[in-house]
Amino acid sequence: MDEERIPIRTATIRVDALLKFAGLASTGGEAKLRVQSGRVRVNGAVETRRGRELAPGDCLELLDEAGAPARTLRVVDSAAEASSP
């Protein structure tokens, strides 16, 4: 599965904010439910803390109901992303 590169302008972004920013949750409540349901992995480990801070280089996977990755997001620095070819 291809990973989507998500550029951020800050040093970190919370898991719930990333889900909303990437369009994987329409509200904070929806993001909270996705995270608390155990359907989010960060760098390969299940993450149930919606406030977990992610930094450039971190990888978030949203799992489908069977537990397989449905979407994969890679957090990148927006400045570095803009300067890459």
Image (spheres, rainbow, N blue to C red):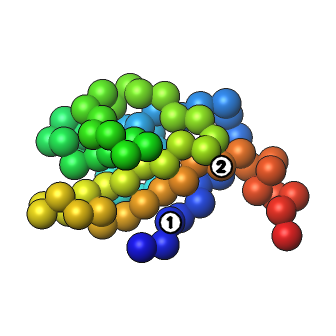
Question: Where in the figure is residue 76, as x and y percent of width and height?
Answer: 65, 49
| Secondary element type, mark 1 | strand
Question: Where in the figure is residue 38, as x and y percent of width and height?
Answer: 19, 42
**Residue tagged 1:** 3
How many angstroms separate mark 2 from mark 1 (CA)?
A: 12 Å
Residue at the far front: name it: 44
The answer to whether any part of residue 21 appears in the image is no
Above or below 84: residue 8: above
Quadrant, the N terminus: bottom left
Q: Amino acid at mark 1?
A: Glu
Looking at the image, do the residues carrying marks 2 and 1 touch, with CB atoms under 8 Å apart? no
- Give whichever of 57, 75 is nearer the camera: 57
Q: Quadrant of residue 41?
A: top left
Above or below 83: residue 55: above
Question: Is residue 6 toward the left or the right of residue 18 in the image?
Answer: right
Above or below 71: residue 54: above
| Secondary element type, mark 2 | strand
- Give whichever of 64, 51 is nearer the camera: 64
Q: Residue at x 27, y 40 (%)?
A: 46
Question: Is residue 36 toward the left or the right of residue 44 in the image?
Answer: left
Mark 1 crowdedness (10 Å alpha carbons): few <14, some 14-19, many ≥20: few
**Residue tagged 2:** 76
Mark 2 or mark 1, which has the lower sequence index?
1
Q: Residue at x 70, y 40 (%)?
A: 9
